[in-house]
Each structure stands twice: as C-alpha cells, then as structure tokens.
Image (cartoon, rainbow, N blue to C red):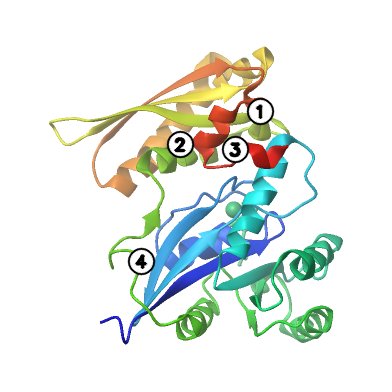
C-alpha cells in the first residue's frame, strides 16, 4: 500500500475572511472549521482530512494573516505561519473582488522572507462568483508578476467551483508515502474543541463589533450518557462585566438562541442528541492567560 499511496500537508493561508475555512470544509465534505462573514474567525490551526484517490490530503486551516496588535493576534499570526512552514504545499487564498490588496502584498513579502525558498506555493483566487470572468485573467497576471506561484486556480470555495481541480492537483503533487490518518477520519481536533468552536461561531454571528473578539468558549465537561446522548457544559469567558448582559441578551434570549443553534449543529455533527449548557463568566484578563491559549491550541509564548 505504501508504494502507491500519497500523503501530505497543505496549508491554507490568506487574509482574514479570504474563505480558508470555507475551502477546508468544502474539501473535507463536512463542517470542521467554523465560518462567519467577520474577519478573524479562525484562531488556531485546524486540520481537516480529505481523500482523493490514493492520496490523503491533510488540509491545515490557519488564522488569517494581518498586522497583529494584541497578544492573541500575535499568537494567531504565529500559528498561521507555523502551519505554512510545516506544509508540503501552501495555498494562498485571495478574494477575487478585492484583488492584490495591501494585506496580500504584505503576505507575499512575508512568504519570501519567512518561508524556505523551496516552499511550494499555489494561488487560489477565491469568490469568483462575485466578479466577471474577464476580470480574473488580469488579476491572475498581476498576481503572478508579483510572486512566482507554481500554479493558479480560480475557485469559489462556497459554491464549489474549481475546488475539485485544485484537489486533484494537490493529490498528484503530494509525496508518496503512507497515510497519516485512518481513511474515514475527517478532522484532527478534539471533539471538545470542535464543540467550543461551534458555540463561538454562533456567538460571533449574533454579537456586534468588538465583542466576538473579546470572548472565548471552553468545553468544561463532556458526559456521554447511557441513553446515547451527550451532555456538554461550556463556559463563555468575557472580558468585561458589561459584556455579560450583552451575551445573555434581553431576558436571556441571545444566549438561548446561541445555545439552540449550537446544540442543533452539534446534534447533527455527532449524530446523537446533545444537551448543551452554557455559562457566562467574566474573566477580565483571559486574553493574557496561558491556559486560555492552550485550550484554543495556540502557543502562549508566540504572543510575546
Ligand atoms: N461569495 C462568496 N463568499 C465566500 C466564498 N468563500 C467564502 N465566502 C464567504 O466569506 C466569508 C469568510 O469565510 P471564511 O471561510 O470564514 O474565511 P476565513 O479565510 O476562514 O476567515 P478567518 O478565519 O477570519 O481568517 C464567509 O461569509 C463565507 O461565506 C465564495 O467562494 N464566494
Ligand atoms: Mg477561518
């Protein structure tokens, strides 16, 4: 088997909101990484596993690359570059309608500076459903003048256009060798973390402005019950007293809606009933606590 099989790591990098997590989910065929219309949704490196013929492609979703300010930002950006450095192939995602932005320019610069020169980098121009076909050729040309990409793909991660082409190319380019995971595994992330991410996604979708960036969710207890259901207890850590009321909402309606949406998604994901209990706790300093970073799968020291 090892003579014909191929396997490797493909890191998805790009600006926040480029569609990296959407692409990972599309490749895997299941929602492993949370997606929102807001920037900086993904906080850590998330592995999703896809099979393509004899090849096993381990996709590494990374936090968006941007100019970091806070400790959490720095740890996220460090995690993203770490994912790129460890990968066999890096795929840079850009948004078709935004083109070669200042942020993308900074990433190209950093690709040259931070990654070994033999690193293989492909370009995926995403969200092609948002632009006219004739604009794409020009953008592809501009991008390839700015950086020596090995190959360029035009895709819509959301609609699935061009995704299979990209997948087949990656599968063919990965090194020969045994698979890293069982054939039917789709993610390499503890269930308690996936469950916390699902709740964070629902909170991010319902809360405004800075609030989603100032909270974190942890699964505190997970009990598999005899009747086949799971009882999951989670804590939502907020940074300020005033945030508790906003997260709870008028008569608790926000947290109720969040809990319901998260529970439904988890029930579907796990294929069994879920009882989800959410508690909101104020923790003014959580953004400076190493334990919170460990829970998120981030390296606290990277924030120094
Ligand atoms: N129109 C369109 N929207 C897309 C496409 N791919 C992703 N999106 C949307 O873009 C937004 C961001 O998608 P994500 O997958 O969360 O982006 P990301 O790069 O993982 O973002 P961060 O985790 O914040 O770095 C979401 O609203 C997606 O639905 C696409 O092909 N077309
Ligand atoms: Mg993401």
Q: CA distance from mark 1 to mark 3?
A: 17 Å
Q: Give above or below for 67 relative to 291.
A: below
Q: CA distance from mark 3 to mark 2?
A: 12 Å
Question: Are circles 2 and 1 on residues that touch, CB within 8 Å?
Answer: no
Quadrant containing the C terminus is: top right
Ranked by sequence position, the earlier of labels 2 and 4 is 4
Ranked by sequence position, the earlier of labels 1 and 3 is 3
Coordinates of residue 217 in the picture (x, y in percent) = 51, 31
Residue 93 sits in quarter: bottom right
Q: CA distance from mark 2 to mark 4?
A: 25 Å
In screen coordinates, is 261 left or right of 38? Answer: left
Q: Give above or below for 205 relative to 97.
A: above
Quadrant containing the N terminus is: bottom left
Residue 219 sits in quarter: top left
Q: Residues within 10 Å of mark 1 (few under 14, many from 20)?
A: many
Does the beta carbon at disc 4 come under 8 Å from ligand 2? no
Does the beta carbon at disc 3 come under 8 Å from ligand 1? no
Q: Residues within 10 Å of mark 2 (few under 14, many from 20)?
A: many
Residue at the disc numbered 2: 196
Q: Residue furthest right?
A: 102
**Tag of residue 180:** 4
Question: Are circles 2 and 4 on residues that touch, CB within 8 Å?
Answer: no
Residue 128 sits in quarter: bottom right
Ranked by sequence position, the earlier of labels 2 and 1 is 2
Disc 1, SS: helix
Coordinates of residue 75 in the picture (x, y in percent) = 66, 43
Disc 3, SS: helix
Q: Image point 33% across, 64% down: which residue? A: 181
Q: CA distance from mark 2 to mark 1?
A: 17 Å
Residue at the disc numbered 3: 204
**Tag of residue 287:** 1
């Amino acid at each position: 088997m090892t003579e014909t099989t191929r396997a490797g790591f493909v890191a998805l990098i790009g600006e926040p909101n480029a569609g990296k997590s959407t692409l990972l989910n599309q490749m895997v065929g299941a929602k492993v990484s949370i997606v929102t219309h807001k920037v900086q949704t993904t906080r850590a490196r998330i592995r999703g596993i896809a099979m393509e013929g004899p090849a096993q492609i381990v996709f590494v979703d990374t936090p968006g690359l941007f100019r970091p300010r806070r400790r959490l930002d720095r740890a996220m950006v460090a995690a993203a570059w770490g994912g790129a450095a460890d990968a066999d192939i890096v795929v840079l995602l850009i948004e078709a309608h935004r083109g070669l932005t200042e942020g993308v320019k900074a990433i190209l610069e950093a690709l040259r500076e931070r990654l070994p020169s033999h690193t293989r980098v492909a370009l995926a121009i995403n969200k092609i459903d948002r632009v006219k076909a004739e604009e794409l050729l020009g953008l592809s040309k501009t991008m390839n003048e700015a950086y020596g990409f090995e190959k360029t793909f035009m895709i819509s991660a959301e609609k699935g256009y061009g995704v299979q082409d990209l997948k087949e190319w990656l599968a063919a380019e990965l090194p020969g060798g045994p698979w890293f995971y069982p054939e039917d595994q789709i993610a390499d992330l503890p269930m308690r973390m996936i469950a916390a991410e699902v709740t964070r996604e629902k909170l991010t979708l319902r809360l405004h402005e800075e609030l989603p960036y100032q909270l974190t969710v942890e699964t505190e207890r997970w009990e598999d019950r005899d009747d086949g259901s799971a009882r999951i207890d989670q804590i939502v850590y907020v940074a300020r007293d005033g945030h508790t009321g906003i997260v709870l909402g008028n008569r608790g309606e926000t947290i109720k809606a969040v809990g319901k949406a998260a529970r439904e998604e988890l029930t579907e994901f796990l294929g069994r009933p879920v009882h989800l209990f959410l508690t909101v706790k104020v923790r003014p300093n959580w953004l400076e606590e190493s334990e919170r970073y460990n829970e998120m799968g981030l390296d606290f020291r990277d924030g120094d």
